[in-house]
């Protein structure tokens, strides 16, 4: 089984690779943006094994995070 979780983009660093720092359930991690180059700071994305693989709206992201907290 694979798990992808929502994360909020806090900053974007393009100095080496498109990379962003995001927040995941109260922890912060750097992930790659190669699959979603259109993403902006403040957006929510789905992350799987260190890659943002899709964007999603804030309502859907918060609902998913709420389910994961149960």
Image: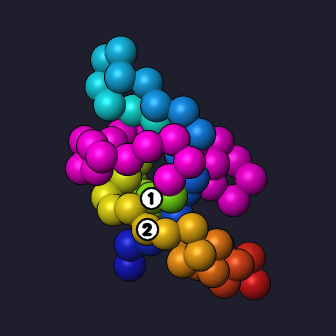
Residue 68 location, quadrant: bottom right
Secondary structure under tag 1 reads strand
**Quarter holding the N terminus?**
bottom left
Q: Is residue 39 visible?
A: yes
Horizontal side, residue 32 vs residue 25: left or right: left
Residue 31: image x %, image y %? Answer: 43, 41
Front residue (pair 62, 3): 62
Q: CA distance from mark 2 to mark 1?
A: 6 Å
Looking at the picture, tell me which residue is in the foreground, 69 or 57: 57
In contact (CB < 8 Å): disc 2 and disc 1: yes
Residue 32: where, in percent of width, then height?
36, 40
Q: Is residue 1 magenta?
A: no
Q: Quadrant of the C terminus?
A: bottom right
Considering only vertical position in the picture, is 2 above or below 17?
below
Q: Residue at x 64, y 72 (%)?
A: 62
Q: Report the disc number at residue 45.
A: 1
Q: Is residue 68 left or right of residue 56?
A: right
Q: Magenta stretch?
A: 21-43
Numbered mark located on residue 56 in the image: 2
Image quadrant in which you'd find residue 33: top left
Of the pair 11 and 65, the residue shown nearer to us: 11
Q: Tell me what residue is drawn at x 39 percent, y 32 percent.
A: 19
State the image coordinates of residue 13 (x, y, percent, origin top left). Answer: 43, 24
- Residue 28 lies within the magenta run: yes
């Amino acid at each position: 089984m694979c798990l992808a979780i929502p994360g909020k983009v806090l900053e974007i660093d393009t100095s080496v690779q498109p990379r962003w720092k995001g927040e995941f359930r109260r922890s912060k991690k750097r992930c790659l943006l190669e699959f979603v180059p259109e993403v902006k700071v403040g957006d929510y994305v789905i992350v799987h094994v260190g890659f943002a693989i899709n964007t999603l709206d804030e309502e859907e992201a918060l609902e998913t995070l709420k389910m994961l907290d149960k």
